Image (cartoon, rainbow, N blue to C red):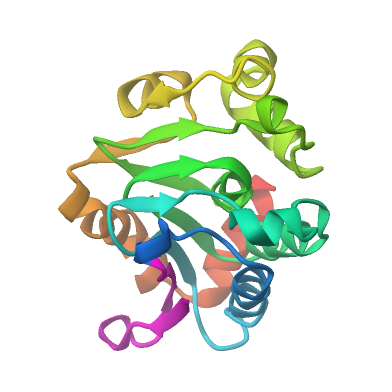
Amino acid sequence: MIRVEDAAGEAGRLRMIRLDRPDKANALTGAMLAQVAEAAEGAWAAGAQVLVLTGTGKVFSAGADLEAAKAGLATDPVWERASAAIAAFPGLSIAALNGTLAGGAFGMALACDLRIAAEGASFFYPVMRLGYLPQPSDPGRLAALVGPARAKMILMGGTRIAAAEALAWGLVDRLAPAPDVLDAARALAADALAADPAHVKAIRAQLG
């Protein structure tokens, strides 16, 4: 359900983590989140300088698998482990959002350095309606991107926003036609893939 691909064409310097459960809109289970965390935690040591997170199909992720959420996944610390691992990656991390981003899946995308989204994607985080709290790091990261009022619109007002509005708000950094999202991510990654690892790490450290 999670595929980890170390791209040979980039001399192993690009690690792609792919959510691969398209029949369930890439809904996340605890095991999937643990796999994401492990792949991100081990990426730099494996020689990756760029980490790309994407999904299979028309949806990036519908958030938590409903049955898993009812069984306690909604409050499981594995969500924070996954987003923390992505945020701690010393190189460049890019969320290549092939489609809609919903619910707890926000955490992984917010933890990335850059977000590229398919033009038809939409974004919503319905924690108010569902009765859950967002993951602890998500509100701060969201507010840092879009501002406190817009973060409240998403988390408290249940606002669903389209890709163009997400771009205008700063939630995503670039839009691309759905088939071209990964190509756009690779284009942004080109300089980091070609650079010396120590240089990549030093610039990333300066940016915090």
Question: Residue at coordinates 56% horizontally, 88% vertically from top-left?
Answer: 46
Say left or right for 205 vs 26: right
Q: Which of 199 and 106 is in front in this view?
A: 106
- Whether the magenta-drawn stretch holds residue 149 is answered as no
Taking the image as drawn, is residue 97 in sight? no
Say left or right for 48 vs 198: left
Question: Residue at coordinates 34% horizontally, 29% vertically from top-left?
Answer: 163
Taking the image as drawn, is residue 56 in sight? yes
- Residue 175 falls in image quadrant: top left
Residue 105, horizontal then vertical, whole percent = 57, 50
Residue 20, horizontal then vertical, whole percent = 40, 71
Residue 51, horizontal then vertical, whole percent = 48, 67
Say left or right for 171 vs 56: right
- Whether the magenta-drawn stretch holds residue 9 is answered as yes
Q: Nearer the viewer, residue 191 or 106?
A: 106
**Range of magenta residues:** 1-21
Q: Which of 29 and 161 is in front in this view?
A: 29
Image vertical order of residue 151 relative to residue 57, above or below: above
Could you tell me how many numbered marks the image carries? 0
Residue 208, horizontal then vertical, whole percent = 70, 48
Question: Residue at coordinates 35% horizontally, 64% vertically from top-left?
Answer: 22
- Residue 94 falls in image quadrant: bottom left
